[in-house]
Image (spheres, rainbow, N blue to C red):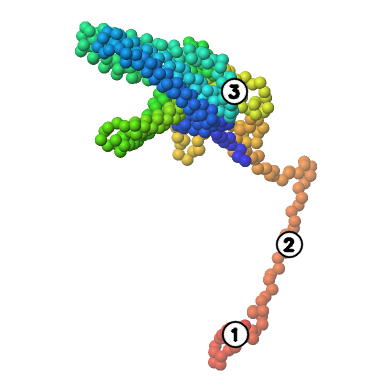
Amino acid sequence: MSAYPAWTPASRPGIIPLHPLTFGTILGRSFAALRQNPRVLLGFALVVQTVSYLIVLLAVGGVAIAAFSRLDTIPQGTDEFDAVVAGSTALTIITGFVLGLAAAALGVIVQGIVVLEVAHAAVAEKLSLGALWAKLKPVVWRLLGYVFLLTTAVILLVGVITLSIVGIWFAAPPLAVGLTVLIVLGAIPLTLWLNTKLLLAPSAIILEHATLLGAVGRAWTLVRGRFWAVLGIIVVINLIFGVVAQVVSIPFSLFGAGLSTIIAPTGDADIGSLIAVVGVSLIAQAATLVIQAVLIVVQSTASALLYIDCRMRREGLDLDLLDYVEKRDAGATALPDPYREHVGRTMMRPPLMPQGVYAQPPAYGQPPAYGQPPAYGQPPAYGQPPTYGQPPTYAPAPQYAPPPTPAPGYAPPAPPAPQPQTPPAPTPDDTEPDATRWTAPGASAPERRESPWS
């Protein structure tokens, strides 16, 4: 076990780690969340998209057939014929517009369900569709009202601009054309800017139960400082699904054209070619519905994750979520909704590392300094955690004292008397002849020769 504090990853009880999210995490989790609860997310969205599409198609088609069938009894070229054509066209357009708003309302309900599912999945909770609808029901009319007001404002703005251009057209056609081009070019960045600024308003209504104006203000505040990240994620998701839609639609178009050529090579339309074209069109529409359902789920998931990320960065929502998870896992019940706690709190996060620690490198041969902890071996102050890093200190080596001096009045002991030294005894070489010595005849002095066996 190390004595030094080590880095540990943030808690991840649900689909996301409970700390501020990165661009890649938000983008990846937006697609991966489909696996968390596919029956609620993808299944519900697909059913709603299919039902709304069939209702709009059948209703608009029925109204158009009923309105334009009157033309069979009216001779062409008369004023009554032109009036019936204009009235039938207007009735069909109005019916399509109203039913389109109803389909958009159903799409908003799908978005609310997805946002609630992602919010609960972040803390590892998986609710049924009925439980999610019970949580969405108190604010569903507020959510629909926000979408209705936003749509009305856009329609009024487009209508005013269109009427102004038409009025200018009668006075100066070239000026009207140039003004139209400028308005279209300026509407693209303006639309992206407004969509980004207001993207989190539905999430604020759903999770915080905010009012209409309060949701707009909350969205404007939360996106501040994260504008480019929010815009980038939305643009990337739309580009991905745009490419997927093209990849799916182009093969069906080519297959339908080839099938029509095979069935009717001369170009004469018959019942067989008509059935083939209708069958291919239905298959293409079914694939389009699946793509649109997945797009709604992914966009709603991304908006919910962006809302959670912005609140983590500005208001410390991750602390509330961690506290909620710990209390829930400990067995606590009747806990308050963490997404409605401390709404609007301002929290400044400290930097991850102290300023200047890694700004200046240490001198050559010197270790970096990380503060001045107390000496090793000393107990910390009461209530303070121990610190590490200071080398231990040892007691000094003992000093040996000189021999004690005698007490006054006593003579020091006399040194011992020197002993007489006796001379060493003579060696046998100097007193006795050696058996290995011999004198050659006629030699003047004796020689010494070593025996090889000595």
Task: Tell which residue pokes out farthest to the right in this image.
Answer: 409
Task: Tell which residue pokes out farthest to the bottom in this image.
Answer: 441
Q: Which residue is mark 1?
A: 451
Residue drawn 72% across the image and 59% down it:
418
Q: Nearer the viewer, residue 221 or 150?
A: 150
Labels 3, 2: front one:
3
Q: Position of residue 310 (x, y in %)?
A: 49, 22
Labels 1, 2: front one:
1
> How far apart are the two marked residues, 1 and 2, measured between alpha carbons?
43 Å
Q: Are marks 1 and 2 in contact (CB under 8 Å)?
A: no
- Under mark 1, the amino acid is Ser
Residue drawn 76% across the image and 48% down it:
412
Quadrant containing the C terminus is bottom right
Crowd band around label 3 with a 10 angstrom C-alpha radius: few (<14), some (14–19), many (20+): some
Q: Which residue is mark 3?
A: 131
> How far apart are the two marked residues, 3 and 2, measured between alpha carbons?
115 Å
Q: Nearer the viewer, residue 5 or 131?
A: 131
Q: Is 234 left or right of 261, judged from the image as shown?
A: right
In the image, which disc is placed on residue 35?
A: none
Q: Secondary structure at mark 2?
A: loop
Q: Position of residue 386 (x, y in %)?
A: 63, 32
Q: Which residue is mark 2?
A: 419
Up-down: is 238 above or below 99? below
Crowd band around label 2 with a 10 angstrom C-alpha radius: few (<14), some (14–19), many (20+): few
- Under mark 2, the amino acid is Gln
Say whether residue 395 is visible.
yes
- Under mark 3, the amino acid is Ala
Q: Secondary structure at mark 3?
A: helix
> How far apart are the two marked residues, 1 and 3, measured between alpha carbons?
120 Å
Tell me which label, 1 or 2, sits earlier in the chain.
2
Labels 1, 3: front one:
3
| Number of dots carrying numbers | 3
